[in-house]
Amino acid sequence: MTNTLTMTVNGASVTRDVPANTLLVHFLRDSLRLTGTHVGCDTTQCGACTVHLDGSAVKSCTTLAMTCEGSDVTTIEGLASGDTLHPMQEAFRANHGLQCGFCTPGFVMSAIKIVERLGSGFDDTALREELEGNICRCTGYHNIMKSIRAGAEAMTSKQKTSPDNGAE
Amino acid sequence: MIKFGIGQSLARVEDARLLRGLGRFTDDIAPPRSVQMYVLRSPHAHAEIGGIDFRAARAMPGVHTILTGEDAAADDLGGFPSMVPSTAPGGGPNFTPPFAIIAHGKARYAGQPVAIVVADTLEQAKDAAEAIIVDYEPLPAVASLADADAPGAPLVWNECPDNLDALATFGDKGVVDAAFEKAASTHSVEVRISRVSANPMESRTALGEWNEAEERYELTGGMQSPHMLRAQLAECVFKIPPNKIRVRAFDVGGGFGMKGVPHPEPALVLWAARKVRRPVRWTSERSEAFLSDCHSRDHTSRCELALDSGARILALRFFARANLGAYLSLAGLHCAQGNIGHLSGVYTTPAIYAEVRSYFTHTVPIGPYRGAGRPEAITVLERAIDAAAFDLRMDPAELRRRNLIGPDQMPYDTGFQFTYDSGNYPVSQTKAEEAAGWANFEERRLESLRRGKLRGIGMGHIVEIAAGMNDEMGAIDVEADGSVTISTGFHNHGQGQETTMRQLVSEFLGVPPDRIKYRDSDTDVQPFGFGSAGSRAAAVGGALFKAISEKIIEKGKVIAAIMLDTSAEEIDFVDGTFTARSTNRTATLAEVAALAHQPMGLPQGMEGGLSHKQMFRPKGPTFPNGCHICEVEIDPETGRSEILGYWVCEDVGRSINPMIVAGQMHGGVVQGLGQAMGEFIEYDEEGQLLTGSFMDYQMPRALDMPQITTISNNVPSPNNPLGIKGAGESGTVGAMPAGLNAVCNALQPLGIRHFDMPATPWRVWQAIQHAGGIEALHKAAHETA
Amino acid sequence: MYSFEYHRAETVEETLKLGSVLEDARFLAGGQSLIPMMKLRFAKADNIIDLRDLDELRGIEVAHDIVSIGAMARHAEVAASPKVQSAIPALAGLAGGIGDPMVRARGTMGGSIANADPAACYPAACLALGATINTTGGDIEADDFFQGVFETALGEGALVTGAEFPVPDAAAYKKFRHPASRFALAGIFVARFGDLVRVGVTGAGRQGAYRWIEAEDALTENFAVNALDGLHADPSQMNSDIHGDEPYRAHLVEVMTRRAVLNASAHCGDE
């Protein structure tokens, strides 16, 4: 019943034997011990499990690991380069965009793709719409909005100068 | 140096790991040989459990053990007690059934643990649980507060007729009744505070280990108060000395009071770990959390105000019913009656009488959630004020203003329960009104009406007790190189204590925050701690670390005097440096610490080291306060409310870190608005939970919530040396009434005087229909135009 | 999740062959409905056949006033497709309003249609636009395809391969979100082809997505909001839950229909 699964995670090729019913999030957390990706609900709503899969933000709790065979996955652990945080991580830090930090990896992963889609000139409602798939219980979203705006500024001003910043 | 200290918006230390995915939440920890626990829960709200046949399940792959209530009874395991005494309806102490860790013979709420399965994997445990046959005999259940004492209602406990556990009265009824006799007008409103679930994004977790070598239990989990939980587990569940249990909490993904309550699962993982001699992991799934986390609020009341002819409050009467659930949780009764003092609000109310009836129902026990009784009392009071303003056709802001306690009256003895420490409520109201444009609101209402929308504005003027649970223990160890390690009984699950406590110590000892290590919450680190709850860490921690730092400095001066050839009385300590007043010679804290750790260099009899640990109790509680204003617009066709703006002028006494304080306000406000606007827990008549996941329970999303403007009007508290009041809960306490008052205000043109939370589209639409629908709105528009 | 065996094939033909030989097999497209159900153990299958490699089902084409969308086109792809945006902006908007960005990055049109969730968005568009659902068992008109709550005319072992949407002269989708689930509490797709108007309703109906014929007749007569005056959706046909009873849902159907007519030919908007 186990399958041999190979994919690229944070730039490195990994191969593990997993049962077919393994979700991507459990592959990351249990098989690879990348525990920064979290599970906050069981109905595909909270987005704490968000990772990048072949260039898109997806919910790793609602993706079979086997479906990702041969894919390229980036998790929160793969964003920073060395000691330098990804501009979006830095923006969350500078703007107090996190409190308990549990939903945060999901928000950061979502936010990076939001900025890639919308650039930095989005209005408030558009950004709130884009956050439909991420739930935070601590911040009231106020500083998350502020962080993503700042992150968008930083990402778009530095765009394409840093190909290894983790954003595919 | 001071740039790291009190008052600086220092970026948080803990963010570095949390943002990289390097946090250590309990489910991130997978010790070797660990196994998983699955909890089989009662599908019935009320049932006799005849027998449990788990022979087939026990033989299934991967299963290590299956345990039931019978096993727990055989092992003499107890439950968690209530910490709040009350009075039975006929006098004498109330009945206090402990919060059982597993059902034995009878299940009293849907979701109560009935058996646990321990297996190699969670899926194996679930497979086995499906093969367990429980012989239930379902019994009639009572699942709502409204039905708790209905004639013939099934009893949760035979000891409590009508399911009424406690009847508590407060104040002098005679005096209050007399005031009502004299009143120029009286105003009554009935308010329901809906039942909600705290829903921290990290659900509850527990990792239990039996340390064979030390013969003791070790628990790691998501909690707010490791020491409290250890005390309960040791004394009440396992009946062993507390040092036979170690309890730790690393990163915890939100708590909001709910994780301050002992729940069954931490006891169950420890019990199971000892049985199977392996680490046992349990992480609640979200749907499991809805069933098994203590719910909150669930309260109905009638509040009556007596006013004189100048609209000044003469007296207040309050009659409440509170749901307790099926058992008394640690703080269930605290939520019901422990914060009744908040009925005084920010007003000069000469006389208050309150009656609180607390009922059992076949539902999961009630526990604290951000505010824990404060939002209930303040919401009812603030609704009563608005209802009175409605009756008198008066601006509710003006009615409040006439009754505010003045700054010159501080400290103010409310004559009911609290003595407020300090605050300037009129200025807070003025600042909030100016920011929100209160004075011009009617123009905006008309503008909305022209677009067919109902606009409303609401105020919530709040004051709340903080730091009421005073005692806390902390320690500072200065190492030989001058670096510092600190510990407290607080736990950081989002509030930022890892940063703010460092800022305090940085301020007091002149050490930069990056040279200060913050120890995890661990009962092995210090023997006592109260934990994080009741908006207390900043106020109590500030005073605590100031006291400890003073001891460190005192000893440092003695050592510095040796180094600088003078006496300790001649030494000043400023910004991390000891200076001899007469010679201006100096020694840094690091130099002093180095000598402190060379006992050969110290005088005979002087103890080496530079450490101090102590407990501390500040003078008294503090009373953070603030004026909240919320503006909403309702689409009468759909009932949907949009929150257009939110303003709060708050008084937290003094901010250690203003950025973090603002963050606490934002989060607190959204939790209050979440409840006012949409969150609710509902059971059906049989006691089956209808809101069992985020598919049915409306968590506030970014799209639902407004930008929040925060303004400060800090008046330092005289009750602790730093003047800090606290910031954890006041956002929630203010937002519930402000949000609800805004909705009621929007509905006012339809003649609606009161509307109960939650303001879901359907409920608002129904209220509009009952008031005559859109036609009535058009009529109103015509009249006001 | 119960355990299962995992399979996939490179072509539709091989995929169908797998489906025919494997016991208790289910196709997995984007998984945004099936996986949640399996996680909660509400759904199970001995064999899961993953459609991820079926590139032949990914295309989006517009020809002869027909928008053809492959079953495996993700919601995000449909939403971002310039072809769909230009031919049927309301359809692109609908796809761009399903769930959230992460769900749209995985969820597929075919999966949504085959699942026939009573609160899903796509069925409303299929009904209103008179789409033809392409399946490996032959083409099925949308009117015949949706048969109730999670019920379709899709044959045993067959696969939805795509859908063909006739390009209307004007269309709009208006959705009132369920406050908690964010699915449609009532979602209305209005499409006008010449004088002929079709109205697809999702989220509200007890029997799943349906066409509101009375509204269609009225709007065909006169494509204007006031043509709906006095017209009432039948509460007895409506669904009910803790966020809205039958009369409320019926009312929302009326309100959202009016708003859709008002917006027709404009972009979709969610409430």
Image (tube, rainbow, N blue to C red):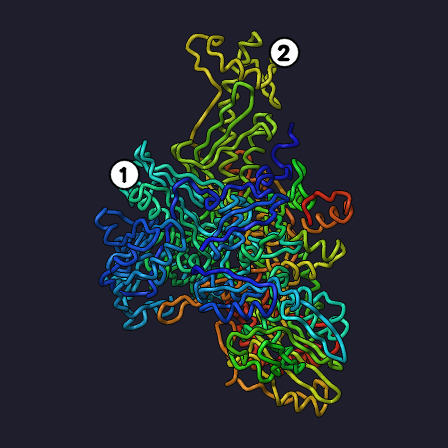
Q: Is residue A92 left or right of residue C157?
A: right
Q: Is residue B562 visible?
A: yes
Q: Which mark is residue B585?
A: 2
Q: Is residue B771 visible?
A: no
Q: Pinpoint residue B463: horizontal percent, then vertical percent.
A: 52, 51
Residue drawn at 39 percent across, 61 percent down:
B322
**Disc 1 crowd, CA 10 A, few/some/many (<14, 14-19, 20+):** some
Q: Is residue B460 above or below residue C22?
A: above
Instruction: Name the residue tied to disc 1.
Output: B240
**Numbered disc 1: what chain?**
B
Camera-side residue of B488 and B100: B100
Residue drawn at 63 percent across, 77 percent down:
C134
Camera-side residue of B206 and B334: B206
**Numbered disc 2: what chain?**
B
Single out the mark in the foreground, 2 or 1: 1
**Disc 2 crowd, CA 10 A, few/some/many (<14, 14-19, 20+):** some
Camera-side residue of C91 and B520: C91
Q: Is residue C242 above or below residue A49?
A: below
In the rendered image, the quadrant that contains the N terminus of chain B is: top right
